[in-house]
Amino acid sequence: MTEKCYLCGREIQSSTFEADGERSFCSSGCHDVHTTLGAPDSLDVTQTTTENKIDEGDDTVPPDQYRSRTFLRIDGMYSATCEAYLESLAEKQEGVISAEASYVTETIRVEHDPDTVSKESLRDVLSTLGYTAYLREDASSDVSETGGTTRRAREMGGIRKRRDDQLLGMRYSVGFLFGAFLLVPYVAIIYPAHLASIFDWQALEIFEGAFRLDSEGAFVFLRLYFVMTGIILLFTGLPVLRGAYLSLKMRRPNTDLLVAITAISAYTYSTAAVILGQNDIFYDLAIVVTAAVTAIVFYESSIKQRALDRLTELTISQVERARTYDSDGKTEEVRVEDLNSGDVVLVRQGERVPVDGELVEDSCTVDEAIVTGESLPVLKRAGNEIIGGSIVTDGAALVRVGTDVTSSIDRITTAVWDLQSATHGVQRHADQLASYAVLLVVGAAVAIGGASVIAFDMSIPDAILLALLVLLAGSPWALGLATPLSVAKSLASALRRGIIIFDETVFERLRDIDTVVFDKTGTLTTGEMEVIEADAPADLLDAVAALEQRASHPAANAITTAFAHRNATDQGLDDQSNSDNNGNETEKTGQISEFTNHQSGIEGVIDGTPYLVGNLDLFAEQGWTVDDDIRSRVADARGFGQLSVVVGRDGTAEGLIVVGDEPRDGWDDTISRLGARDTDIVVLTGDDEEATDFFKQHEAVTHVFAKVPPEGKTATIRRLKSDGQVAMIGDGTNDAPALAAADLGISLGGGTALAADAADIAIVDNDIRSVETAFDLAGAARRRVKQNNLLAFSYNGIALLALAVGFFNPLSAAIAVIAGGGLVAVNTRRKLLQ
């Protein structure tokens, strides 16, 4: 049986690290995490998967080899009620073992027997009641069609999604146009008539008795408003009515139910009032409530789409085509899923390796940062393993496909989906209020209606009308307006600052973060190799740059780029003269007569003089002399993933070139300010320990974990979550599962598509200082939502007061609507951050 890492479950391929002689780890990083954060049996957070939760003794549950795990994206999910409904709907299907949904990521994961129920059947079953389901694996990669390069952008820009957005826009348009038409008689006649009954003003005399319904007028009025308001209610308000229906079905009252209670009560009361010849007709309230809430939902949707449009500039991580290479040297382009174990694929310089495999011959340099987090490229020789998703930066690679025809990126993608589907959303603050309000308002309406019949001998029709009036005045429907408006404005405010927030629940579920975890490469650093320091004679640097043009070790490109102006091109190395950037003659570099590429450097001969470029181990191996000063400077240069390149000639080291991954501007202030919030700061990276030594000295940093694989990062986040809320900040594909596992994931804009898909927040630019701004925005947005929810009750304050004194009519209801909606709108327009 293959041994697995005690921390992350990764299969152990090489040497292990033991904590107490019983537990084995895949890396020193996983061992350090376990030693520092404690054993899992002392934690509440576990790594239990869906399979672990299934009763293996149940004869109806098929064995592992007969199960299939399907991930679907569901358009139209927006609440915890949606999660519960779709899970129950899926689990009712024969052959389905379990289902787990998340409205946060609009994803549902279904465990099922593929012979009993297919993926396509699940998709069709879950496409109901306004939801649209589609397989995540089928997201189109055609950027020209979908307008996005990330999978999230492709999914959200797909045909179904565009159709749903267009339909929502149509609902809004119908509600606005028909509603405006139907409100004209109210503004012109009905409101002034009610005002005239209250105030004895000469200007209002002409409206006294202007609105009286005789039998013929009542029929015309009823026919027009009953039909037109009904159209608005059913077509424009269908999303709200669907949400209300689901909340009743799942016994989870929400704001949709409050809106539906108000709109339907107004429609029902008005219809009965017209039949009875009364003037208190609230069709206007049904129209305004339905159209206003739908309009705000449409506005919120448009802001989200604008945010998703910003994702199109991010890179794509998956490889969909591969180039097979046969024994005759012929190549053929095929789909990655058509590859078989043992096939040989050709990967040219600059291309991404499609699947995991083994290098067949020669050597090449590979950038594995996207998967491992290592900032320095790695030299690979024949027989070495090649990670799918890595980039060949120098040379070309012939890769023999492994037994499992997948890439590390494919496995990371699946891990992200798995985590996303398990990320249940929290019940919105407004929905929590709604759950109490529904019981209170409906209970009050029933009690008052019943008491009026029993205690005051009121007729049943009049008692029903009174109960409906209580619902009209007491139902805080404006909560359904306040939350989406607050969310939309908050999203727009963040977008203006270059911060994309994918999930509006960030503004409610972002509690006080206890721990902020930073990836290093590409997050705290730029992720780009460059020469930071060069201390060596100029002519030696000239020679080194000439040699590096033929090299394939990690520092070659950085050194060549830095000193390219000193040398001629490869074709001009044998010329008798060179010139600098100003065209002035410089000393010739000379002719390279010998060249050798070592594992940790290069050596060569120029004009008969031997040169050596590499690390201290290479100099020791070749027997070259290195003085103590250079050794000391090599030790001092460690940190931030910096690589010290020793250069020398004629058997002696003469200088040092430091190549490294530069720290981002503002990283120090960002960490210090986040730490000042009583937040623990953790640096988590796949780089070696030398690359992280510098962070251990920072007073705000609590823990530094190096050489942690992607699976280990996710396990670390889980263990940290046992002590409080955790935010993860990263940019690479290797960070994606950890971003998805954290309570809040933040990706930088220069990161990969998979990281952006896994995160809750993406920062468009690479300014790490925006991280603190994102936290400020989230906190301010959450406060704004609570303020607006409180202001939404101002409608009820006015309406209930009017009802209590006997003046609740269309005019007072309109005043209450204007006051409640106006206060929410004014508060929303205030700057989110000063």
Image: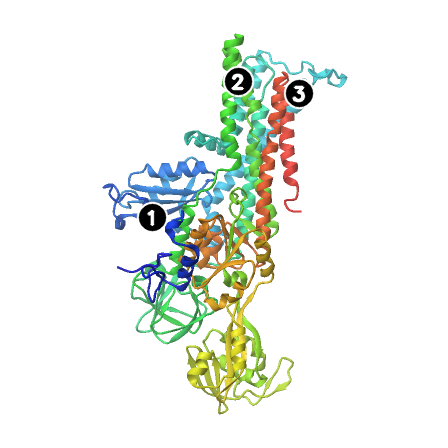
Q: Which numbered disc flags the more N-terminal residue, 2 or 1?
A: 1
Q: Residues within 10 Å of mark 2 (few under 14, many from 20)?
A: many
Q: CA distance from mark 2 to mark 1?
A: 50 Å
Q: Is residue 237 visible?
A: no
Q: x, y percentage for residue 727?
A: 50, 51
Placement of the N terminus among the 4 image quadrants: bottom left
Quarter of the rendering containing residue 473: top right
Q: Which numbered disc flags the more N-terminal residue, 3 or 2?
A: 3
Q: Residues within 10 Å of mark 3 (few under 14, many from 20)?
A: some
Residue furthest front in the image:
20
Q: Residues within 10 Å of mark 1 (few under 14, many from 20)?
A: some
Q: Nearer the viewer, residue 743 or 338?
A: 743
Q: Which mark is residue 69?
A: 1
Would residue 778 appear left or right of 384 to someone viewing this image? right
Q: Which mark is residue 467?
A: 2
Amino acid under disc 1: Arg
Q: Which mark is residue 86?
A: none
Q: CA distance from mark 3 to mark 1?
A: 62 Å
Residue that label 3 marks? 189
- Position of residue 100 relative to residue 581, above or below, is above
Amino acid under disc 2: Ala
Q: x, y percentage for residue 409?
A: 40, 59
